[in-house]
Amino acid sequence: GAVVSQHPSRVICKSGTSVKIECRSLDFQATTMFWYRQFPKQSLMLMATSNEGSKATYEQGVEKDKFLINHASLTLSTLTVTSAHPEDSSFYICSATGTPETQYFGPGTRLLVL
Amino acid sequence: SQQGEEDPQALSIQEGENATMNCSYKTSINNLQWYRQNSGRGLVHLILIRSNEREKHSGRLRVTLDTSKKSSSLLITASRAADTASYFCATRYTGANSKLTFGKGITLSVRP
């Protein structure tokens, strides 16, 4: 199946710093990528939909100035958590559309903000 | 909320037994998908069933869909300890630009 990678897999940072997470589709081109957040033992919550070459569409309640998304190419989308705080600690997962019906998920990035 | 709901929330079985997990949803769908997530890892797509399908198989997995009851079930036969994971159903509702909406997940523990 199609492969989506994320980097880094784990990051620990101090409160107030910004963290960039990369999501890459390795063997296919993805016009649309999605960013999810998952708190422990909870479901995935969609944060935003990222389309190549255009602005991301954010879900209600997600601060676009806090979670900056850039989808500069058909194989790369980045999520930057700006001025991260402890409450931003979470598991961030990206996915990319392969066929119109299926999404391929990355392995996730564990963010811990101290 | 359009979020699907799985039940049970947690399931513990002996290796070799069958595991049945259920998912209910609220509005019309294009398709329903089941995913698996090992602890602290990403999601692995297991199977997709379209709204005009009633049953699909993939190896030891069997998925059914009852659109009249707005429910789906995932059956894992002859379970193995390696099947221990969280399982999520996700629905793609009808309508333009519909997103994939995840349920809360079921934690399956298979005892060796």
Image (cartoon, helix red, strand yellow):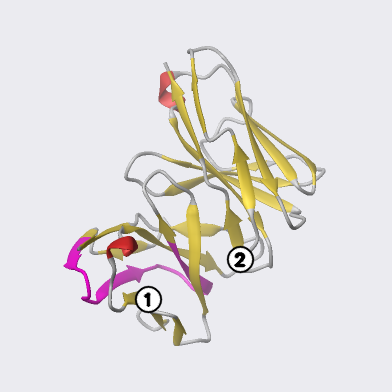
Identify whether A7 is placed above or below B45. above
The three-letter code of the residue at mark 1 reads: Ser
The numbered dot on residue B1 is none
Q: Quadrant of residue A8?
A: top right
Image quadrant holding the N terminus of chain B, namely bottom left
Magenta region: B11-35
Q: Secondary structure at mark 2?
A: loop
Task: Give the percent coordinates (x, y) of residue A99.
Answer: 69, 67
The answer to whether A16 is drawn above or below residue A22 in the figure is: above
B111 with respect to A58 (left or right): left
Q: Where is residue A95 shown, x and y percent of the image? A: 60, 51
Q: Nearer the viewer, residue A12 or A34?
A: A12
Q: Which mark is residue B72?
A: 1
User: Dot 1: what SS?
Assistant: strand
Q: Residue at 34% x, 69% y: name it.
A: B23
Residue A79 rendering spot, x and y as whole percentages: 63, 33
Looking at the picture, tell me which residue is in the foreground, B31 or B16: B16
Q: CA distance from mark 1 to mark 2?
A: 18 Å
Q: Is residue A26 above or below residue A83?
A: below
Can residue B17 be found in the magenta stretch? yes
Q: Which mark is residue A102?
A: 2
